[in-house]
Image (cartoon, grey):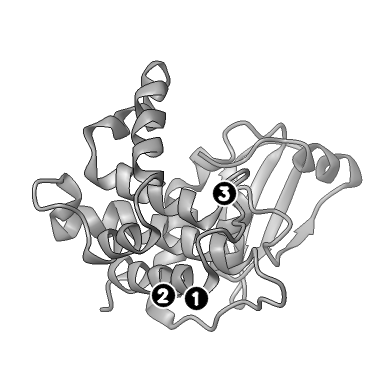
């Protein structure tokens, strides 16, 4: 099976070089270079602890600033080469588990900020991996939703109840689109939403994502 982390890492780097360091992304306030600096710090610096531990966020931000001062091509090359040897992400299984979705989503953050983008055709193995992410940690992504949320995979109508509450909204689409919606890329995710008017309005105003 093709490893998602490896293929998306390579594709993200190609996309970054083609797009350019100053191009926007779907990550609020981040240009392409900022996103690359985030990836370099995340998997290569002890300062990345501030990503998850808010009191240490200033430490991470200083590491970001140092990374941003580096040449863009250097950041791209470091991401392309993968995690440093002593990083826990250097273990293939950890890399796939932790970076498969990370690289996919940030690749789309670059792609979908460009005019004229279209969804990619993804192979079945990738679709299965993305649907596993939806059904596996989608509950965490909708934990703050004030309504029930059900994910529906199309085609096939496979469903995963992510938040069991009433009223409820069903988010329907290909796995990639549903995942991007749940991660807060609402405007760029091509999904269908079904539910009562009030439930749809409440979900539209709710924070989604990690």
Residue underneath mark 3:
183
Tell me which residue sits at (68%, 40%) in the image. Answer: 148
- Under circle 2, the secondary element is helix
Residue underneath mark 1:
18
As rendered, which of 168 and 9 lies closer to the eye? 9
* Image location (x, y in percent) of residue 14: 41, 75
Give the residue at the far right of this rendering: 197
Tell me which residue sits at (88%, 40%) in the image. Answer: 198
Q: Please, is residue 169 above or below residue 206 in the view? A: below
Residue underneath mark 2:
14
Tell me the crowding category of disc 2: few under 14, some 14 to 19, or many 20 or more residues within 10 angstroms, Cα based.
some
Tell me the crowding category of disc 3: few under 14, some 14 to 19, or many 20 or more residues within 10 angstroms, Cα based.
some
State yes or no: discs 1 and 2 in contact (Cβ < 8 Å): yes
Label 2, label 3: how many angstroms apart (C-alpha)? Answer: 23 Å
As rendered, which of 39 and 165 lies closer to the eye? 39
Tell me which residue sits at (55%, 63%) in the image. Answer: 110
* Image location (x, y in percent) of residue 69: 38, 45
As rendered, which of 17 and 97 lies closer to the eye? 17
Tell me which residue sits at (34%, 50%) in the image. Answer: 70
Q: Please, is residue 154 above or below residue 188 in the view? A: below
N-term mark: 3 or 1:
1
* Image location (x, y in percent) of residue 200: 82, 46
Q: Is residue 21 left or right of residue 41?
A: right
Mark 3 vs mark 1, foreground winner is 1
Residue 68 lies in quadrant: top left
- Under circle 3, the secondary element is loop
Residue 81 lies in quadrant: bottom left
């Amino acid at each position: 099976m093709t490893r998602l982390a490896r293929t998306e890492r390579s594709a993200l780097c190609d996309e970054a070089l083609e797009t350019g360091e100053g191009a926007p992304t779907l990550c609020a306030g981040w240009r392409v270079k900022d996103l690359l600096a985030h990836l370099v710090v995340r998997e290569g610096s002890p300062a990345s602890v501030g990503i998850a531990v808010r009191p240490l966020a200033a430490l991470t931000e200083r590491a970001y600033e140092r990374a941003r001062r580096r040449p863009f091509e250097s950041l791209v090359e470091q991401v392309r080469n993968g995690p440093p040897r002593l990083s826990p992400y250097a273990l293939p299984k950890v890399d796939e588990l932790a970076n498969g979705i990370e690289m996919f989503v940030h690749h789309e953050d670059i792609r979908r900020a460009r005019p004229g983008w279209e969804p990619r055709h993804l192979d079945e193995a990738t679709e299965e991996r993305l649907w596993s992410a939806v059904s596996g940690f989608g509950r965490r992504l909708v934990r703050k939703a004030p309504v029930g949320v059900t994910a529906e995979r199309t085609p096939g109508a496979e469903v995963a109840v992510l938040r069991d509450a009433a009223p409820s909204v069903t988010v329907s689409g290909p796995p990639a689109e549903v995942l991007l919606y749940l991660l807060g890329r609402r405007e760029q995710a091509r999904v269908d939403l079904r539910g009562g008017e009030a439930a749809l309005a409440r979900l539209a105003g709710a924070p989604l994502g990690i």
